Image (tube, grey):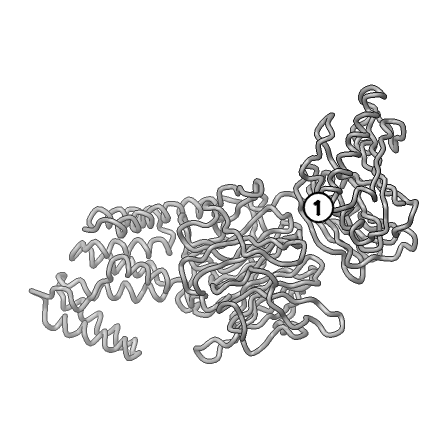
Amino acid sequence: MGMRYLRRTSNVLLMVRFYQLVFALLFLSLSTFGQSRSAINAFQKAQDAFRSGEESKGWKYLEKSMKKGEGAYYQPFIYAGDLSFQKGQYVQSINYYDQAIEISPVSTIYLKKSMACKYSNQWDLGIESLRQYLTNARFVGQRRKEAEQMLLDLIFTKDSYKRFTSDTFNYNIQKLSFSTEQLEYFPTISGGDDHLVYTHRHILGTKPSDENLFEGALDGITESGEPLGGYLNSSLNEGASSVSADGQFMVLTVCNRQGGAGSCDLYYSHWNSDFGWERPEPLPGEINTGRWESQPSLGPDGRTIYFVRGRNSKSKDKDIFLSVKDSEGNWSKGTKLPANINSPASESCPFIHFDGLTLYFLSERSPSLGASDFFKSVRVNDTTWSKPVNMGFPLNSYGEEFSLVIDKSGTFGYLSSERGSALVTKQQSMYALDLYRFDLPEHLQPEKRFNYDLLVVDSITEKPIGSARVQLYNDNGVQFFAGESHKNSGIVRLMSDGSFIRITAYKKGYMPYSSRISTTVMTARPMHGQEFAARIKMTPIEIGKSFCLRNVLFDLDKSSLLPESEKELKSLLITLTDNPNLKATIIGHTDNQGSRKYNQALSEARAQAVLNWLVDHGIKALRLSFEGRGMDEPVAENETEWGRGLNRRTEVQLR
């Protein structure tokens, strides 16, 4: 946010870079030896007229200067080319640049011409002009490196545009009905599918006002959004938010707030059904520093936040970080994502999809189409990300993009951009920062996942249990959700890749819950009272009752605990810690693979390993005992791997 970092217009930015690269052409300082004095005078009058806003008069003197120059005075042609470029008249600007080159092939004119060719889709001519510029120009070092990169970008743009025009996929980019002439940006998908939360900034004359969070209905007819209800917005800057899947929790950026750690910090708010969003508070922990923290994206696990950190909102050192919430609810300072995500250029606007794997973000790196482009990367493991892919036309434009989010389904999304009504941004699009909906082709979609709702209930009363701590893992032990059931409905919303899910749940006063389910037998997300995908039935603590820990895992044919078992053992540890009068017997069970004697010994050794872990973590040994029951008490058939997996379990009996 600080969202002063938003630049007014992308073409202006490109031109600034353009002129920085070549030190500009200072028209009046160029040699005028041998030129017609009347041509020079007319050119000076033309510049004076344009500066005073007399455009018609300016063009009159400019044409006079061209004519009087008698084919030897090229400055007015360059000036006319620049004026045409700024108006979006790219073909006309090329014509003026060509006339200037005929008089004197100054290297920088080729650079200007290449830019006009890019914006008029004359790729080969633009590439030829840029190569001519590199051949003629007398510079080395960083300036040459930047010019060579411009050539690579132009070649990439040509290829990207050709792929776009030959593709039959319809991106169906539509400006949202509530996107106005004001600034609207940083969209975020709320808990439901019928509204979009976004940052709104009103323009007063030529000066933007403070930023606030708005909400717009996605009905296609709503003409304006409304400020979010509650106590989020103030006379300062609030924006760049991320909302949890259940719509009950928000992380947002707050700037210039008294007592803040830096110019912009990350805050949180809870939804209150009585009045709306509660007053935002700083995220606890070390995530906020004296630097600039902004643009959060809340992970679907509820315990991770991707965000941007830099010296300030205008600095070029902005990078994407990942913060993790600990068991006490505090957020870590954040770890910088690896170098293939954070390039030497500036990165911003991260969005982690609901699959927890696919990251979309904005970067000023090359190759690029405009000043900043959208990229996509997929998390391979906890420390490795795939090579980012430029998302190409038309999601990226010649202009400057700002932020993008993808719906849970992965098939469509929303973005904010300065592109105006066309693919090519025009100079007059200043402040035309709008919201768009688009469809997403398959190669840019996240991994295929499925939406499910789990319902946490009391096993006796069947009533929902709110604020139960729920953790979900895939069969590889990778956690993809860690959060709480909705405080009122008991619902847990999740996404899965369609394989198996390991579930652990804890609520004070209840036995720890543990299960392994297949999503192939789960129903889709319920609508209007349909059955939930699965029910997490938690049993109140009662002496003499027992429960199973199905996600306590061991090495094959061994009693050594696997690292992923610790997550579930901690639930048992918390239960025994919260209930100091409870005692427990740990009972090991196996499948029927091997002899009865072998399985009996293995079950005893595994039960003892669990007991030892609890003792090592502070539970007195006098409260614990263990036994093994081998293969004698199966709960499923042993003919399938699924059944054998259910039989391999750790039982805990309370006493």
User: With respect to residue 5, does 477 lie above or below?
Assistant: above
- Going by the picture, which residue comes out furthest to the left? 34
Residue nearer the viewer, 381 or 326: 326
User: With respect to residue 36, does 109 lie above or below?
Assistant: above
Q: Locate residue 529: give its quadrant.
A: bottom right
Residue 599, given in percent of the width and then of the height, sits at: 82, 24
Residue nearer the viewer, 494 or 403: 494
Residue 188, given in percent of the width and then of the height, sits at: 61, 61
Q: Locate residue 276: give its quadrant.
A: bottom right
User: With respect to residue 27, does 578 lie above or below?
Assistant: above
Q: Amino acid at mark 1?
A: Phe
Local packing at callout 1 (Cα closer than 10 Å; few below 14, some 14-19, many 20+) is some
- Going by the picture, which residue comes out furthest to the top? 595
Judged left or right of residue 134, residue 120 is: right
Judged left or right of residue 573, residue 531 is: right
Residue 76, given in percent of the width and then of the height, sits at: 20, 66
The residue drawn where x is 45% and y is 77% is 207
Name the secondary structure under disc 1. Answer: strand
Q: Locate residue 372: give its quadrant.
A: bottom left
Residue nearer the viewer, 597 or 516: 597
User: With respect to residue 384, does 204 lie above or below?
Assistant: below
Q: Look at the image and tell me whether residue 571 can be seen.
A: yes
Residue nearer the viewer, 127 or 100: 127
Quarter of the picture holding the C terminus: top right
The residue drawn where x is 63% and y is 70% is 280
Q: Which residue is mark 1?
A: 450
Q: Look at the image and tell me whether residue 172 can be seen.
A: no
The residue drawn where x is 30% and y is 59% is 18
The residue drawn where x is 64% and y is 60% is 189
**What is the count of numbered marks?**
1
